[in-house]
Image (tube, rainbow, N blue to C red):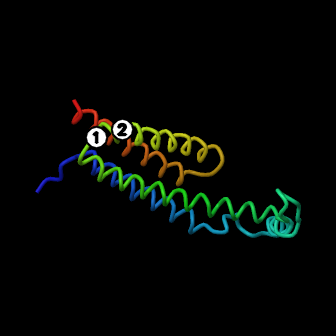
Amino acid sequence: MRARLTTTLFLRIAAVLTVLYALGHSSGYPWTPALGPDEAAMIQQMQTLRFEAEGASRTYWDFYVGFGVIISAMMITLGVVLWQLGALARQDTTRVRPIAATIALSFVINAVLSQLYFFALPTMFAVAIVVTTVAAIALAGRTAS
């Protein structure tokens, strides 16, 4: 039996890729490079230097880890939204297109920033999510006509 290429299928693929991307990101916790003496000293400073932020005493490490966890949670949430869009696409592909386009654009930005500031693997995940989401949008346009 041959799989039919549908908007739902591509959105579900994008959803799975997004959750895998989030799990890959999370598995890198605490998101630090190899621990040589220079890196260890820098991390020690990040963990001990405290400052006031909006009335709370925080360290740079708090911000670093907190934003890393937030990114993982947001990507998992985006994966769930993409999966839900796949279900919605079965009833009305035209309503799915602008939402999927917004998510695709966010992953284009993610790919550019990943390439600038990180390394190849997150860039490849972001590009794959863009490709599958754009494919879903293209198929939604065909079925909506």
Which is more toward the observer, 14 or 40? Answer: 14
Q: Is the residue under label 1 in contact with that under label 2 (CB below 8 Å)?
A: yes
Residue 30, percent from left and from top: 67, 68
Which is more toward the observer, 42 or 49? Answer: 49
Specify whether 57 is left or right of 35.
Answer: right
Q: Is residue 42 above or below residue 3?
A: below
Inspect the image, locate mark 1, and give the three-letter code of the amino acid beneath it. Thr
Label 2 secondary element? helix
Inspect the image, locate mark 2, and give the three-letter code of the amino acid beneath it. Arg
Farthest residue, direction left: 1
Q: Determine crowd level at label 2: few under 14, some 14-19, many 20+ residues with C-alpha closer than 10 A.
A: many
Q: Residue 93 has which mark?
A: 1
Residue occupying the point 89% across, 65% down:
49
Q: What whole-number distance in Å separates the C-alpha atoms at marks 2 and 1?
A: 7 Å
Which is more toward the observer, 66 or 44? Answer: 66
Q: Is residue 121 above or below residue 134?
A: below
Residue 25, percent from left and from top: 56, 62
Q: Quadrant of residue 36?
A: bottom right
Residue 128, percent from left and from top: 42, 48
Q: Quadrant of residue 52?
A: bottom right
Residue occupying the point 66% across, 64% down:
31
Q: Residue 97 has which mark?
A: 2
